[in-house]
Amino acid sequence: MEKALINLHYEIIHGDFMKAGEASSNIKKALMQLGVDNAIIKRLCVACYEAEMNIVIHSYGGCIDVDIFEDRIEMNAKDKGPGIKDIELAMTEGYSTAPDVAREMGFGAGMGLPNIRKSSDEFEITSVVGEYTNVRIVIFID
Amino acid sequence: MNEIFHSVELIEEKCNGCTRCMIKCPVEAIRLKNSKAVIYGDRCIDCGVCIKVCPYNAHVGKRDVLDVLDNFKTKIAIPSVTLYSQFGEYIEPGLINDAIKSLGFDEVFDITYACDIVTEITKNEIEKMPKPAISPFCPSIIRLIQVNYPELVDHIVKVLTPIEVAAILIREKYGENSDGIGIFYLSPCVSRVTKGKYPFLSSETHIDGVLAISDLFPQLLKYINKNKAAAPQSNSNMSSTGIAWAIPGGQSKAMNLEEYIAVYGVENVIKVLDEIEKGKLSNVDFVEAFACTEGCLGGILLADNPFNARRIINKYYDKLDKRCEINEMSEEYKSRFLSDMKNNKTYNPKLAEDFASAVKKMNFMNKLINSLPGTDCGQCGSPSCKAFAEDVVRGLSTVDECKFITLKGGEGNEGK
C-alpha cells in the first residue's frame, strides 16, 4: 500500500465537547504549513470537525487519521460504538439520533454525515450495529 | 520579515528577558533572542497584549505627538467615540469638543455621523455576503484573520471604517482648499496607529496622524474641570447609534440586528473564528470581534478602566436618544466608502515553498516534538515546545537551544 507522506493521528474522547474541534484546528495548521490551497483546507476542516462531533456525540470514543499524499488527502474516522442501523436514513439531511444533551448544546442538527459527504470527493461509510462506524473520505489536491 | 509596519515596539534596554510577553502573546509572535524579546512582524497583530503585560514597560505603542499639528494650517480632530466615556460622568459632548479645540484644533468632526453612514452601508453589504459577516472595525482582528484565517477574509465587510469615512467627508468639504489641512484621529488603541499609517485592507488612508487619548487626557480633564459651569461653545449633534459603536454589540444594535455575536479578547475571538471556519455559525448574521476587553473601551491608550467607561457610555446612549437618519444614499455615494481590499497582505505559513520540502520539514518537526520535554518552559526562547520545533525547521532557532532535549526516534506523529 502506498505510504502517506504525513500521518496525523488524533484520539477522540466520547462526551468531550470542550476539546472537540482540536483535531480539525491542528490539521488546518498542518495543511497551511504544507501550503495546501485554502479552499481544500476549508473542506477538510468542515469534514473533520463533523466527524469529530459524531464521535464525541454518538460513539464510545474513537480516532481520526488524516493521511496526506502527493495528490490527495484521506481522512479516516473510526469509532467503537452503537454503529448505524440504517445508513441511508443517517445520510438524510436533518435526520438525527443525537441525544437531548447534545441538541441542547446546539449539536445534532442531522447535518453531520451529509456535510462530510458534501465536503469530500470520495465518501465511504461502513458500520456494524453494536460495534463500530468507519467513515473514510478523500479530497484531491489539484 | 519586518516589512509590515507595526505600532508595537520594543525598547531593548528596558527588556530584562523575562518570558511574560512571549507566553502571553495570543498569536505566538514573540521570541527571546539573547535574553531580549523579539517581535516577529509577519505574525504580530498589534493587539498590545505585550504592552499590557510587560512589567518593565519595554513594549511601547508608537503614536504621533501634538507637535505634529504645527505642520498644518487647519487642524481637524476626529475623536473616537470612546473619548466621551473617559471622564467618570456624563459631560456635555460640546464641552468635550471645546476641550479638544483647546489643544490647538480648529474643528472637531462628529464621528457618530460617519458611524451611521457605515452602519447603513454595512446593513446592505451583509445581505450579499457569506454568513456570518465580520465587522472590519478592529484592526487587530482583521490582521488576525489575514494571518491565521485567510479563508475567512471573504467574510469581512468591505466597508471603510468610520474614521476613514469621516476623513473623506472632511476632505470633500474643504474641496480645493484642502491643502494644509491636517486630519487627526484621537485613538483609544495602538492598533489604529498601525492602520492609520499603513492601512491593510484598503490601499490608502485619508488621515494625517493618530494621537493617543491617554496622552491628551490630562489637558482635556483640566479644561473640562475648569469650564464645567459655563455653557459649551461647540455644539454637538452626536447620535446614540453612533455612540453605540464604542461597545461590543453596538454596531449590531445600530443595525437592529438580532442574530449577532459580540466577542472580545483575542483568545475568545479565536474560538469564534474557529467555529466559523468549521462551518458553524452560518445562521449568524454578523460578528463584532474585538481584541480588547470590552472592545474599544479596553484600548490601552485610554485613561479609565473599561467597565467604568461602559457605565458612562450607557449614559450617553440613553441621553442622546437620537438616530442619524441616513437612509437615502445613492450607490455612487456609497461606493466611495467601500474598501478596495487591495492591501490584503497575508502571512505565509508554509514551511517551505515546494510541497516535497515542506513535507520533509514537517516530518522532522513532528519527530522533534516527540523529543522535546513538552513542558513549555520557554527557556529556549520560544513560547512552547511545539513552537520551538517549528522555529527549528524554519531556521529561526537551533536544536541546541533546548537544554532538555532527549533525542529519540519517533514515528513523526503529530498529536497524541
Image (cartoon, rainbow, N blue to C red):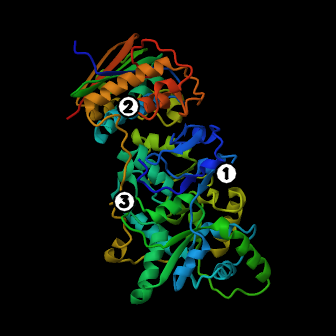
Q: Residue at x 59, y 63 (%)?
A: B246
Disc nearest the viewer among 2 and 1: 1
Mark 1 surroundings: few (<14), some (14-19) or many (≥20) residues within 10 A: some
Q: Residue at x 68, y 77 (%)?
A: B96
Q: Which mark is residue A30?
A: 2
State yes or no: discs 1 and 3 in contact (Cβ < 8 Å).
Answer: no
CA distance for labels 2 and 1:
35 Å
The chain ID associated with circle 1 is B
Q: Quadrant of residue B221?
A: bottom right
Q: Residue at x 31, y 41 (%)?
A: A38
- The amino acid beneath tag 2 is Ala
How many numbered badges does the structure rendering display? Answer: 3
State yes or no: discs 2 and 1 in contact (Cβ < 8 Å).
Answer: no
Quarter of the image with the N terminus of chain A is top left
Residue ID for mark 1: B57
Secondary structure, mark 1, is loop
The chain ID associated with circle 2 is A
The chain ID associated with circle 3 is B
CA distance for labels 3 and 2:
33 Å
Residue ID for mark 3: B127
Can I make out residue B139 in this image?
yes
Q: Is residue B209 left or right of residue B349?
A: right
Q: Residue at x 35, y 45 (%)?
A: B151
Q: Is residue A23 above or below residue B157?
A: above
N-terminal-most mark, 1 or 3: 1
Q: B110 and B105: which one is in front?
A: B105
Q: Quadrant of residue B84?
A: bottom right
Q: B335 and B175: which one is in front?
A: B175
Q: B86 and B281: which one is in front?
A: B86
